[in-house]
């Protein structure tokens, strides 16, 4: 079933209409808004509106006037040639609620494409990892949503190719007012022939999330995203971002693997979170995350397998909490180490 969205002239177009457009029509007719509107929205890209300056983009917050009302936006000004163009090409035909597609585009005085997205109320996942109010149920729901997005990229976005995101991490997961996750950050994503190795000299993943198999193969596959997703799963479980002490970029992944193998994961989980977990739900989640971090790509599950396991973990936690609400039993703290 096609979805409908609003073009820059206020008319609505279906996903089928967008697919039928040329790329120039998509950018210049469907997404384009004049630069003066973005300058007004961001107060001429004022320093006080700057949210982040990375290696690829400067990101500004703002309020854009649309249809008589203001909406919160972020404007991403590219610092590298081609990154905004690549993102537009990769995301153009996406049709999934857990993926972010461009809302509008504009151009600055240097003729660079500025990508505009709606700003989500709860911002990004990395800002909530340590929050004591983000429940295990919410964490599972977020992980399932991201898994659905990645399964779509790897299997459904294109018949003959898969899309490799290449930079999965908690800061790339946006959360709306209902805590529904949306994956963004496709500046360096690639379309690769299914079952083929995508050879590249540019792997732009953040260091703690990078697929270690890249060093031996010089290329990426969809299993590269699986490794990065596994790191993110352990971030959600441990309530903290992956770190790189002593220049060891795989410290966090090794820490997670060793604690799983020694049945000591609960040592790294906040006590309040640990007490509210269903044991079966936790075990499925932990085993799935651990398998994602296998050094050999052939030993890692694919995203369809991962999605099924995480959905089961969510289902078990939901039943657990429903029984508690119904008064069927009293919450008992988990005992012992993970099994």
Image (cartoon, rainbow, N blue to C red):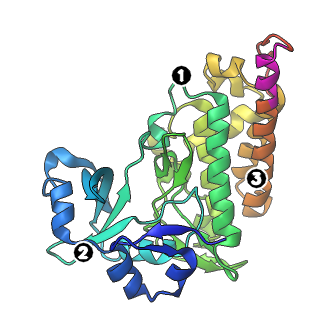
Query: Mark 3 near mark 1, Cβ–Cβ under 8 Å?
Result: no
303 vs 41, left or right, is right
**Does residue 208 appear left or right of residue 48 in this picture?**
right
Find numbered disc 2 in the image and state the secondary structure of the residue it sits on: loop
Where does residue 34 sit, x and y in percent of width and height? 21, 72
Q: Which residue is mark 1?
A: 132
CA gap, disc 3 to disc 1?
A: 26 Å
Residue sitting at x 49%, y 41%: 125
Magenta stretch: includes residue 321: yes
In the picture shown, does residue 182 fall above or below 18?
Answer: above
Q: Which residues are magenta?
A: 319-327
The 10 Å Cα crowd at callout 3, few under 14, some 14 to 19, many 20 or more, is many
Q: Which mark is residue 306?
A: 3
- Position of the N terminus by quadrant: bottom right
Instruction: In the rendered view, tell whether residue 48 sits above or below residue 160.
Output: above
- Locate residue 31: give its quadrant: bottom left
Q: Residue at x 69, y 21 (%)?
A: 274
């Amino acid at each position: 079933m096609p979805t409908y969205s609003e073009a820059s002239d206020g008319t609505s177009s279906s996903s089928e209409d967008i697919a039928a457009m040329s790329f120039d029509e998509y950018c210049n007719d469907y997404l384009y808004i004049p630069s003066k509107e973005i300058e007004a929205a961001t107060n001429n890209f004022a320093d006080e509106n700057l949210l982040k300056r990375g290696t690829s983009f400067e990101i500004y917050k703002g309020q854009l006037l649309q249809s008589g009302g203001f909406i919160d936006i972020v404007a991403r000004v590219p610092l590298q040639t081609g990154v905004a163009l690549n993102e537009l090409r990769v995301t153009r035909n996406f049709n999934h609620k857990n993926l972010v597609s461009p809302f509008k585009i504009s151009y600055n005085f240097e003729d660079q494409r500025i990508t505009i997205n709606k700003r989500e109320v709860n911002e990004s996942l990395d800002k909530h990892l340590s929050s004591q109010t983000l429940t295990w149920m919410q964490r599972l729901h977020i992980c399932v949503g991201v898994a659905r997005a990645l399964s779509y990229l790897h299997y459904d976005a294109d018949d003959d190719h898969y899309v490799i995101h290449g930079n999965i991490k908690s800061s790339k997961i946006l959360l709306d007012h209902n805590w529904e996750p949306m994956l963004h950050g496709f500046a360096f994503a690639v379309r690769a022939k299914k079952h083929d190795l995508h050879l590249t000299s540019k792997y732009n993943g953040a260091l703690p999330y990078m697929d270690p198999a890249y060093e031996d193969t010089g290329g990426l596959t969809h299993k590269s995203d699986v490794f990065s997703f596994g790191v993110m799963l352990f971030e959600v479980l441990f309530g903290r971002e992956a770190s790189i002490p002593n220049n060891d970029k795989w410290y966090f992944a090794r820490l997670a693997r060793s604690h799983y193998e020694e049945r000591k994961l609960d040592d790294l989980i906040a006590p309040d979170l640990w007490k509210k977990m269903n044991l079966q739900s936790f075990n499925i989640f932990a085993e799935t995350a651990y398998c994602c971090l296998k050094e050999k790509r052939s030993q890692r599950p694919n995203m369809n397998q991962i999605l099924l396991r995480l959905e089961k973990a969510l289902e078990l936690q939901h039943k657990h909490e429903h029984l508690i609400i119904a008064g069927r039993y009293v919450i008992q703290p988990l005992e012992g180490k993970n099994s």
